[in-house]
Image (cartoon, helix red, strand yellow):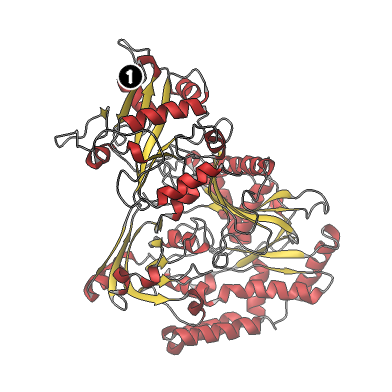
Amino acid sequence: MSLHPRIVIAGRLALACAALSGCGAPTGTVGIPEKCLQSGDEAPEFVRQIGCLDDFLALASVPLDASLPGARSVKVVQDHADDDALYFQNSVLYPIHYDFVSTHLSGDPLPLVPQLGEFNTTEYYSPERRFNLAAVTYYEQPKVWAIELSPYDSASADMIAALYRSVAAESYFGGSLYFHPTSEAVASEAERLPADIPVITTDEIYAGIDYQPLSLGDGMGRLRFLKAVELETEYVSYQDILVLDEAPNDISVVQGLVTEEFQTPLSHVNVLSLNRKTPNMGLRGAMTSEELRAFEGKLVELKVDATAWSVREVTQAEAEAFWDEHRPEPVVLPALDLDVQELLDIEDVTPEPAEGESLREAIKTAVLAFGGKAAQYSILARTEDVPVAKAFAVPMYFYDQFMRDNGFYERIDALLADPAFTTDAARRDQELAQLRADMMLAPLDGAFQATLKAKLAADYPGLKMRFRTSTNSEDLDGFPCAGCYESHSGDPADWSDVLDAIRETYASIWLFRTFEERSYYGIAHTSVGMALLVHPNFEDEEANGVAVTGNPFDPSGLDPAFYVNVQSGGDVEVVAPPPGVTSDQFLYFFSQPNQPVSYLAHSSLIDAGETVLTVQQVHQLGTALDAIHRRFSPAYGPAAGNHGWYAMDVEFKFDDVADPGQPPTLYIKQARPYPGRGD
């Protein structure tokens, strides 16, 4: 969607503002003089005017959708039944509009406020609504004041203008106030606003922000500055906190991470940080930050929260106590089920739960023979509205057979008994690389090869195949191990190509980073087994992406949405893009009328004003995400008694593999529990 030139110009002016108020926004409205109007220690339940920053902060909360950091919001209500009376509500006491209006603006002598369902339908979507509802948000870093509607609000330009002018007239920042569209639909309506109401876009606000909180929490370690490319030769420890120029594709366990280039919440290293419960943040200019450089090489504590970060020096005793306290309890992997020795079509891998059995237990049972990825893919394959590629699974038995027949278990035991291997990271890296090289030359059982060759010829003739990792060390409580292992493709037309793909996939269990991750979590290395999820390879992808079936910016669950990262083509992965490459990132309010989309960023690989997915493709994706969210709830979500924040982490493609030459269609590649974000 292209934006009106006035919108772009207004946004650029906002980013030039350096003062808290009075920054000369192009508006004819002038607010009230700056003078604090509230007194006393207790914050009021509402006010009619905002006279100073302290007045605002007394009522403000972090917005439900904190996708832009460093923000504070106050909900506002304009009541048409009471001569357009304006209220700034205490947004800590009343986090949603309905809480406030049903308490203070219902009856005696005002009209009664209806029940929540009717209220939401009327007040966000009807032109005959009683209230105009919005929020005033202050973005601290770019110093922008903005009035914002809910992304699904269908208010007309006239309604927006009336509310904007009322808020501006009753606040000290009125001369600096902007309207910030929160979805594509709201942005379209904003193009019809009068010329005296300035509009600022999300991209323009984001450009003025230098801090990006991702995985919240604190860690203690030695502060080291490296370039991401140096991680290929430098060894890092769980006792380190790293400052990097950009997000790496992968990283061993560290106590914290700061990247100069911003990440996305679904980036591989952020999911790792969430899994490990270690802090992770983006900070523009991090590599030259005087505050950080002052602690280079020292033991520090890094704290990352939703609105600010801090660093302080700590003693060796403090750091050692922290490491001891936060070291995870040793994880014991479930024993492999080596009795299953047949290739199964994916639909048969995880049977529907027996009477009295939960879906979670059914998945856990299937994991023992077929690993986490195949066990959950089996559920996807039997879920309506979830398109997946035809697939089958190779059980754990054949990995175990390969390791035993070639003496690799004994070799690993010998390495683990060697002090030089266990104490020297460089030696471990070297020995593991040699182990993987030798695995690539080792034979696979002849009977297994014959069975596999017959399966591919009968069910997948002429197709290049993808052999995907599926282990008993994935998506576990205490050890999710996101991205630990590597999948590979092979073409049955050249049988050696298939054998190399399988061996290389098996060998990825012994990658250095993966080995280090297991060591940190106290996992017995030879207890890991690998099954294979096998399906046709995606050769010509139109788009690839990851999504979360919840709103990661809103742990409260009050503002539900799907969060999607998607990139054009298949050459650039969303979770590990090259430096400077961005993807489409958006919130999709699938459960709301009109299903609005709020773009947070746009792909740098396509033309400006374009989007990676069409409206139809976004809806197809949303339908699948909704089905996945509901399907797995009995295993991981509210239907399983989990009343915390719940979402599934989903990988997807748009590809024409099933019908070359036809419009690309959606394929769900994987679904697993998302580790979530701390409050």
Residue corresponding to mark 1:
105
Q: Secondary structure at mark 1?
A: loop
Q: Residue sitting at 58 percent across and 35 percent down?
A: 595
Q: Residue sitting at 70 percent across and 72 percent down?
A: 502
Which quadrant of the view contains residue 317?
bottom left
Q: Is 599 on the left or on the right of 212, as rendered?
A: right
Q: Percent position (x, y) of residue 81? A: 38, 15
Residue 155 appears in the figure: no
Q: Is 511 on the left or on the right of 261, as rendered?
A: right
In this view, the residue in front, 642 or 236, is: 236
Residue 218 appears in the figure: yes
The crowding category of the residue bearing disc 1, from other C-alpha atoms within 10 Å (few below 14, some 14 to 19, many at least 20), is: some
**Amino acid tagged 1:** Leu
Q: Percent position (x, y) of residue 613? A: 66, 48
Asked if 32 appears above or below 546 in the picture, the reply is above
Q: Percent position (x, y) of residue 111? A: 37, 12
Q: Percent position (x, y) of residue 666? A: 70, 48
Q: Residue sitting at 85 percent across and 63 percent down?
A: 462
